[in-house]
Amino acid sequence: MSSPPVTLWELYWGFLSIGARSFGGVLPWAHRVIVEERRWVAPADFAEVLALCQFLPGPNVGNVSVVLGRRWFGPMGAVVAFAGLMALPLFWVFGLALLYADFASVPAVKAVVTGVGVAGGGLFIGTAFKLAKPLARKPWGIALAASCFGVIAIGRVSLFAVLPVMLLLGWLAARRGLI
Amino acid sequence: MLQIAFYFALLSLVSVGGIPSVMPEMQRLVVDVQGWMSAAEYTQLFAIAQAAPGPNVLVTALIGWKVAGPAGGLVALGAFCGPAAALAYSIGGYWDRMRDAPWRKVLQRALVPISVGFIVSGGYVLATPQGPGWQSALIAGAGAATLYATRLNPLWILAAGGVLGYLLF
């Protein structure tokens, strides 16, 4: 059974505790706090909200905070949930950036941080391949993904030009059941 | 600062697939077009946002800060999240009611390969700050394979990337 938060304060603390603990990714912690610890929403409901937020532009879990905050407390809820989610991480990331600024001239530190960034790029690629599993037997889907990569990453064409074209192609292919 | 706010607000609305999708376009703007930082610095800022706890959207705050100071950081984060949040806010209920509409399913299927292509692009751009090379191919490839094949916490993958970066760069 799910029981939504009763006060804005409770909402704020819940999202604060998500942001506070989200080492290595926010989503697992969002699920743990919202569904398992506080039981604000049922698991299936959470999956629905997440699907919407992944589909919409913008940061996924940030969108989850807005949609759920709004559901329970209207505009105030959306703002409070989002602020709770971002408050501590913002503090830490600025702290870490200040610390890094002091050591950025040390070549070894620069090499380590660059390595972390490159590995982070690898995480994106791994995530994309997980998302791509449903495309395994859909050559048109693979071709569309590959052309997106070709024009954006290699061709360096602006996303603003690419997105409308690809959306149109994707829409046509999906309507014919090719994707 | 106004420039970055305006541009990030526009990016907000095309960020299907989240932050990874817009990393190439953001890099194109701040590195290639405006020259606010180098590609290497861009990847380093991203590394800090990844290593710190919290949503990776915080990289927008770091870029804003680098370009226009602490206030620029807050403005950039707000500009990037605001329009998308407004969209999520207004569309939430409607989307639920359209659960079984055919166009919603078509749109969802169409977006899968597009997001995949954009996210791989984001990974590629971040992994090649000095252009392609065997070192970055090794680190990024190993990271991608580990994430794909195991349930290891991504933090360990980032840590291993740091060690390899120390040894290879």
Image (spheres, grey):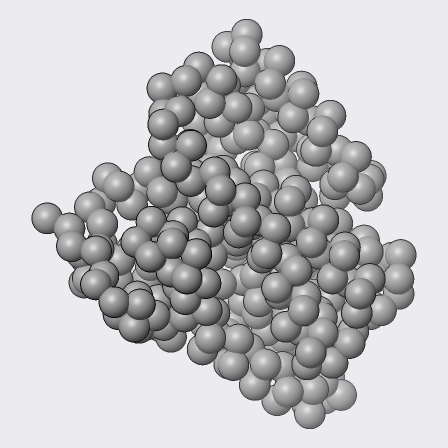
Q: Nearer the viewer, residue A88 or B22?
A: A88
Q: Residue at x 57, y 37 (%)?
A: B115
Q: Place residue B129 in its image quadrant.
A: bottom right
In the image, residue B59 lies at what x, y percent? 62, 66
Q: Residue at x 63, y 81 (%)?
A: A97
Quadrant into which the C terminus of chain B falls: bottom right
Q: Place residue A169 in its image quadrant.
A: top right
Q: Is residue A54 visible?
A: no
Indicate whether B37 appears above or below B93: below
Indicate whether A109 appears above or below B91: below
In the image, residue A124 lies at what x, y percent? 55, 51
In the image, residue B78 lies at what x, y percent? 61, 64
The outermost residue toward the bottom is A102
In the image, residue A87 lies at what x, y percent? 46, 75
The outermost residue toward the left is A1
Q: Residue at x 15, y 51 (%)?
A: A2
Give the total number of marks visible in the rendering.
0
Q: Nearer the viewer, residue B22 or B121?
A: B22
Quadrant into which the N terminus of chain B falls: bottom right
For residue A10, side relative to residue A166 (left or right): left
Q: Residue at x 71, y 70 (%)?
A: B64
Indicate whether B76 appears above or below A160: below
Q: Is residue B79 visible?
A: yes
For residue B81, side relative to residue B131 (left or right): left
